[in-house]
Amino acid sequence: MKQLISACLLVCANLAGAYASAQTLEATDAIARASIPGAPNSAAFMTLSNTSASDISLVSVKSDVAKRPELHGHINDNGVMRMRQRESIVIPAGGQVVLKPGGLHVMLLGLTDRLMPGGQVQLTLIDEAGQEYPVTAEVVDMRQHTGVSSKQGAMKGHNMKGHNH
Ligand SMILES: [Cu+2]
């Protein structure tokens, strides 16, 4: 009887410990790049905030929209930025990591369908302990977005110059 009780105490303590140290990861501003017809790949970007007291090391990603979703980063290869698959993306305890174009990103290789602007993409980030973090990303036409803002910038510049040229 005494053994049973101590066994229970041990298990209960472990469960409580596991619950207390449950890691939480919040994804904000999650977007996926809309794909043009026939484009095989896309990418997703977001801000990841680790609200737990332990580092979270993401090691893989799942998604139904791509045959091979991967964690990617960029490396400087003799002055040329190239993207490479990463074994992990670590979000430090209490810290943030931003996934953005030209930096870390979720690569969506082998799209199973076209990503249309206004749609949504479901991603599941997985850490080294196997814990899953679901993320919903809004599909955004980033090409058009960039074009519009640079056009606006150019027009602004033109207006500011006035009749000087
Ligand atoms: Cu990539």
Image (tube, rainbow, N blue to C red):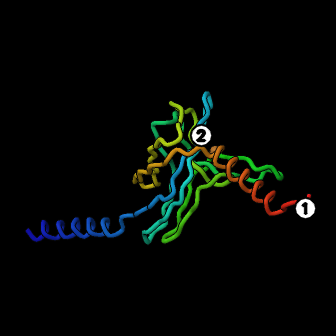
In x, y percent, where is residue 20? 32, 70
The mark closer to the camera, 1 or 2, is: 1
Residue displayed at 51% across by 31% down: 113
The residue singled out by tag 2 in the image is 42
Q: Residues within 10 Å of mark 1 (few under 14, many from 20)?
A: few
The 10 Å Cα crowd at callout 2, few under 14, some 14 to 19, many 20 or more, is: many
Which picture quadrant has residue 107? top right
Q: Residue at x 48, y 71 (%)?
A: 94
Give the residue type that dot 1 points to. Asn
Mark 2 secondary-structure assignment? strand
- Residue at image point 56% right, 44% down: 70
- Which amino acid, by three-letter code, is at mark 2? Ser
Is residue 112 shown above or below 147? above
Residue, disc 1: 164
Question: Which of pointers 1 and 2 lies earlier in the amino acid sequence?
Answer: 2
Residue 42 screen position, x and y as percent:
59, 40
Residue at x 61% of width, y 48% of height? 72
